[in-house]
Amino acid sequence: MADRQQVGRFRARAQQLDREQATLDETAICDIGVQDTGPDGARWALAVRGVDVQALADDDLILAWTVRGAPHFYRRAEIGQVAAAVEPFSDADAGKRIFDAAKPLKAAGIANLDALDEIAARMRAIVTTPTVKGEVSARLTEAMPEPYLRFCRPCNATHLYEQPFRLAALRAGLELRPGTSPPVLQRIRGFRKAAGADSRFDLIRAYLRLLGPATPKHVAEYLDAPAREVKARWPADTVEVRVDGETRWLLDADRPAWERAEARGTRLLGPFDLFLQARDRATLVPEAARIKEMWPVLGRPGAVLVDGEIVGAWRPRKSGRSFRIAVTGWRKLPATTREAIAEQAERLAAYRGVPLSGVDFTV
């Protein structure tokens, strides 16, 4: 029987949140993808795991729409393996991942995977040079028949459904140019999808390795996949553990790390850091009010992680040319913890390239 503290320590250690210095090749979260959302996105997630992001070459990383249609960074050399790993498990899985786009396709007798292949082929033909997303969308709208299109109220225009657009991009051999808004798509040089992904990139195994112990339902929610598809592919080399009375699973190879789970260190995690992407939020943050605070519909804060436990939330506050960090502690934070948080705030300021004017604590 284990508790949530053990879960937090195991994940913090597995995700290498206790490291001070490491290389990109040594960074485990690149296997599952590092979500790049917001100003403190993927590069900050790498930085808090000890990677010197300033020293990375332009070609070390590649950005693509993958899991849940979100932009994720990977090691560029591994993108062929990644493309194979993020493929839907089946046509039914593809239908789940593209949400409401599946209904008109089904009515028209078009299989979901066939639809993604058709969109991908059209996208690749369009994107011969770096192209803004809006232009790609407009040209796709002209080229695709009605079952692929919808009227978008916010845009007051008809265009392709968003999830098929995003999930077809990597199938088309397209990457996102980092730092562009609106997004710019471009061809991946020498792209070739692997025939099958190495087990290191298998998303179920990666979830268990980095966000375990978990259930098939947790993994399915992370992938936007049907739970039955995940259950059908559940690794045979797993072991059962009990967490707060619930049966979950770990990879057998990770059992020793689980049994001696230990993690030390203070980190300011970005709002979409992998640690916060686990689907068992009540395990990480047991109080319902705190869950709403940490994962609101809009405007997520970052998390203050201390020794594998979330102890509060943080938000940046602009102050002229500098900025401050507002920390809301969920319990009284000792002086040593406040000092460690202040050190991490200085680290974030250096990463952002702006002066830090101070850290404000409230409990």
Image (tube, rainbow, N blue to C red):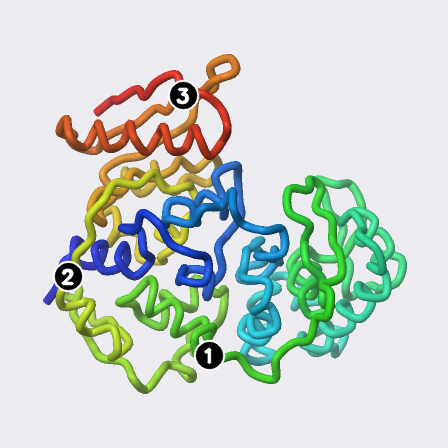
Tell me which corner region of the image, top left, top right, bottom left or bottom right, holds residue 217. Answer: bottom left
Give the left or right position of residue 303, taking residue 204 as reference: left
Q: Residue at x 22, y 28 (%)?
A: 339
> Which residue extends farthest bottom?
236
Indicate left or right for 299 with 171 as reference: left
Q: Say which residue label 1 marks.
A: 229
Mark 2, secondary structure of its residue: loop
| Quarter of the figure with the C terminus | top left
**CA distance separating discs 2 and 3:** 40 Å
Above or below: residue 198 compared with residue 151:
below
The image shows residue 137 at horizontal and vertical percentages of 79, 53
Q: Which residue is farthest top?
A: 320
Q: Earlier in the sequence, mark 3 or mark 1?
A: 1
Name which residue type carries label 3: Leu
Q: Residue at x 46, y 79 (%)?
A: 229
The numbered dot on residue 12 is none
**Do the residues under discs 3 and 1 have CB atoms within 8 angstroms?**
no
Quarter the N terminus occupies: bottom left
Helix, strand or loop for disc 3: strand
Reply above or below: 356 against 200: above
Question: Residue at left 35%, top 52%?
Answer: 275
List the residue tagged with mark 2.
244
Q: Position of residue 293 (x, y in %)?
A: 34, 36
User: Label 1: few (<14), some or many (≥20) within 10 Å?
Assistant: some
Residue at which label 3 appears: 356
**Dot placed on the residue nearer the N-terminal end, 2 or 3:** 2
Q: Secondary structure at mark 1?
A: helix
Spot occupied by residue 122 in the image (x, y as percentages of width and height): 83, 67
